[in-house]
């Protein structure tokens, strides 16, 4: 792997983590420095930084280092991201069959909304998903649901990099409007709105993991002519129930929803 135009200290820190991970036992600073062809003071400083962030821990008796809890947390997060679409797929298929509509599963990936799974309905008039990434989560029902359950810091980071004033959604152009929309989503546990001049009705509901964190959103866009006062309640119930079933399969308990994920 080339290291051109990359940060050397980051490479070295990752080299340390990989070396500790493959060692099978705690490793001393001198041994680690020799293995990685680093200076001992450099290795020691990197280890101190990694220890402060709880990626490594030092045995007080031997003064040697091993991987710590934060590495395990990252591993669980990685496995969860891969697991969610797999767990959801059968439920997405069932929902698509029930409504005879296309269904999508959205997740936050690298700070953007990504469609990680979908089922296309086999009928003449459908709303197709021609995007994998949605860079304006304000204009996506899945994106809105995911934003609604972000922690305060995570939401602030998103709005800082995606100013509300640049939103493509007509009903979200100010932070006050965004706050009201996200509060309503949390209150009713789903997001539904008409877009594209009333030609498309879109709805999404949150998927929670065992920690009560909203890790995904089940979304269904439906051509406007197929939605009316009689059909809309049933559509909402079906989408929310599908999201609830996926959540249960991920270990979620009905009473647990976290605001700190």
Image (tube, rainbow, N blue to C red):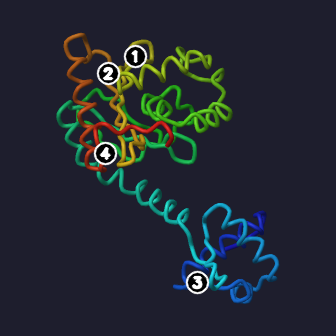
Contact? badges 3 and 4 (CB < 8 Å): no
Q: Is residue 35 left or right of residue 192?
A: right
Q: Is tag 3's residue or tag 4's residue first in the polypeptide sequence?
A: 3
Residue 212: x and y, percent?
38, 42
Task: Pick the residue in front: 44 or 87.
Answer: 44
How crowded pointer 4 is (Cα within 10 Å; few <14, some 14-19, many 20+) is rated as many
Calculate the distance from the C-alpha at mark 1 to the C-alpha at mark 4. Answer: 30 Å
Which of the 4 image quarters holds residue 52? Answer: bottom right
The circle on residue 252 is 4
- Identify residue for label 2: 223
Q: Is residue 171 left or right of residue 240?
A: right
Task: Pick the residue in front: 48 or 149.
Answer: 48
Q: Is residue 48 above or below residue 128?
A: below
Front disc: 3 or 4: 3
Q: Is residue 12 above or below residue 170?
A: below
Q: Residue at x 60, y 66 (%)?
A: 55
The circle on residue 247 is none
Residue 42: x and y, percent?
80, 76
Calculate the distance from the C-alpha at mark 3 to the C-alpha at mark 4. Answer: 36 Å
Q: Secondary structure at mark 2?
A: strand
- Identify residue for label 1: 194
Which of the 4 image quarters holds residue 165? Answer: top right
Task: Pick the residue in front: 61 or 99.
Answer: 61
Task: Pick the residue in front: 30 or 222.
Answer: 30
- Identify residue for label 3: 26
Front disc: 1 or 3: 3
Q: Residue at x 59, y 79 (%)?
A: 20
């Amino acid at each position: 792997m080339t290291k051109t135009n990359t940060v050397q200290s980051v490479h070295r820190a990752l080299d340390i983590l990989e070396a500790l991970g493959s060692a099978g036992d705690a490793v001393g600073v001198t041994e680690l420095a020799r293995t990685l062809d680093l200076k001992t003071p450099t290795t020691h400083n990197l280890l101190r930084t990694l220890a402060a962030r709880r990626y490594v821990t030092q045995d007080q008796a031997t003064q040697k280092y091993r991987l710590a809890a934060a590495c395990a947390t990252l591993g669980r997060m990685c496995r969860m991201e891969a697991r969610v679409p797999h767990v959801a797929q059968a439920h997405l298929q069932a929902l698509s069959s029930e409504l005879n509509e296309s269904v999508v599963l959205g997740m936050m990936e690298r700070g953007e909304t990504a469609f990680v799974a979908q089922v296309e309905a086999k009928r003449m008039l459908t709303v197709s998903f021609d995007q994998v990434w949605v860079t304006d989560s304000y204009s996506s029902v899945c994106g809105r649901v995911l934003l609604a359950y972000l922690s305060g810091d995570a939401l602030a980071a998103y709005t800082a990099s995606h100013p509300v004033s640049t939103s493509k959604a007509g009903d979200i152009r100010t932070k006050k409007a965004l706050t009201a929309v996200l509060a309503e989503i949390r209150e009713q546990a789903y997001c539904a709105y008409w877009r594209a001049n009333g030609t498309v009705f879109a709805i999404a509901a949150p998927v929670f993991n065992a920690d009560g964190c909203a890790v995904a959103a089940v979304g269904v866009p439906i051509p406007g002519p197929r939605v009316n006062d009689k059909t809309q309640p049933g559509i909402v119930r079906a989408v929310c129930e599908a999201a609830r079933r996926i959540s249960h399969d991920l270990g979620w308990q009905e009473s647990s929803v976290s605001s700190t994920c």
